[in-house]
């Protein structure tokens, strides 16, 4: 039996599945992986992307932050791929209990998933730092320079976790709860190098750990099944 057939067989047996995903889930939708050879972190800018995407830079060089953010962080024309759609289908079948994602693009919800824990936030949500008013992503796209609140003129900030910022406690608790109760954990499209998000997989105590990633990860040795394939191809293969 090949690896994908084995994956389909395990999936068929389990009724409490959680998916933990990273950038590789979105690359097949045309969103670049920051850490790939030709990714964002290897491009040349006035400042390193890690610096630009930090809380300190946001507070002190807000204009330059938004120039970068609009050009390199927003992929609003991207569409879900086979992985997103199959996960949404598995949720509707009550097999998949949660998606835990490091991505900020909202594609899981666009595909139909509802129980999604976005560890690093979402570009689709934005709030005024002064009065708390909510804004959709259109506010960022349609404004020039630093986006300002219509009510109080405060700075509108994306609900994206920047470097130096903590992950949302409620999101972490929800993700840990889902992972710790899962019978099967699928880790897909992530090298498990981004801390603290990657540490959440250690809460898994269930039966089957499946790892789908093109390159090796720190959890390979603990997995029941390791598939070195495109994640979209794997999911497309199990649900025609």
Image (cartoon, rainbow, N blue to C red):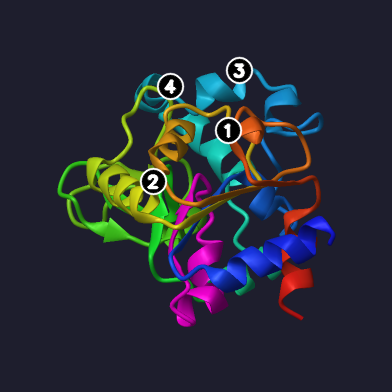
Residue topped by disc 2 = 158
Tag 3–tag 4 contact (CB < 8 Å): yes
Graded by Cα atoms within 10 Å as few (under 14), some (14 to 19) or many (20 or more), the crowding at tag 1 reads: many
Question: Can residue 10 be found in the magenta stretch?
Answer: no
- Assign a secondary structure to mark 2: strand
Query: Helix, strand, or loop for circle 1?
Result: loop
Q: Is the C-beta separation of discs 1 and 4 under 8 Å?
A: no
The mark found on residue 47 in the picture is: 3
The span shown in magenta is: 88-111
| CA neighbours of label 4 inside 10 A, class few (<14), some (14 to 19), many (20+) | some
Q: Which residue is mark 1?
A: 192
Is residue 91 covered in magenta?
yes
Q: Label 1 vs label 4: CA separation?
A: 26 Å
In percent of the image, x 78 and y 42: which residue is there?
214
Label 3, label 4: how far apart the Cα atoms are: 10 Å
Residue beneath the point at 33% across and 60% down? 135
Residue under the image location 68 percent in, 22 percent down? 45
Residues 35 and 1: in front is 1
Q: Position of residue 225 (x, y in %)?
A: 69, 48
Badge 2 crowding class, 10 Å Cα cut-off, few under 14, some 14 to 19, many 20 or more, is: many
Q: Position of residue 199 (x, y in %)?
A: 44, 31
User: Which mark sits nearer the N-terminus, 3 or 4?
Assistant: 3
Identify residue for label 4: 57
Label 2 vs 1, first from the N-terminus: 2
């Amino acid at each position: 039996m090949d690896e994908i057939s084995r994956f389909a067989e395990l999936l068929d047996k389990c009724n409490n599945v959680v998916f933990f995903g990273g950038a590789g889930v979105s690359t097949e939708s045309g969103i670049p992986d920051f850490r790939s050879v030709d990714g964002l972190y290897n491009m040349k800018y006035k400042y390193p992307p890690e610096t630009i995407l930090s809380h300190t830079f946001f507070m002190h060089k807000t204009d330059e932050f938004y120039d970068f953010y609009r050009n390199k962080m927003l992929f609003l024309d991207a569409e879900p791929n086979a992985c997103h759609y199959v996960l949404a289908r598995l949720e509707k079948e009550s097999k998949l209990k949660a998606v835990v994602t490091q991505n900020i693009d909202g594609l899981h919800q666009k595909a139909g998933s509802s129980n999604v824990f976005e560890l690093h936030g979402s570009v689709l949500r934005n709030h005024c730092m002064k009065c708390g008013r909510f804004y959709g992503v259109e506010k960022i796209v349609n404004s020039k320079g630093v986006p300002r609140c219509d009510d109080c003129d405060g700075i509108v900030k994306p609900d994206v976790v920047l470097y130096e910022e903590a992950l949302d406690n409620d999101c972490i608790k929800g993700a840990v709860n889902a992972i710790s109760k899962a019978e099967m954990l699928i880790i897909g499209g992530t090298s498990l190098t981004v801390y603290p998000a990657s540490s959440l997989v250690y809460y898994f105590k269930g039966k089957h750990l499946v790892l789908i990633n093109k390159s090796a990860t720190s959890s390979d040795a603990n997995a029941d099944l390791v598939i070195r394939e495109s994640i979209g191809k794997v999911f497309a293969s199990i649900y025609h």
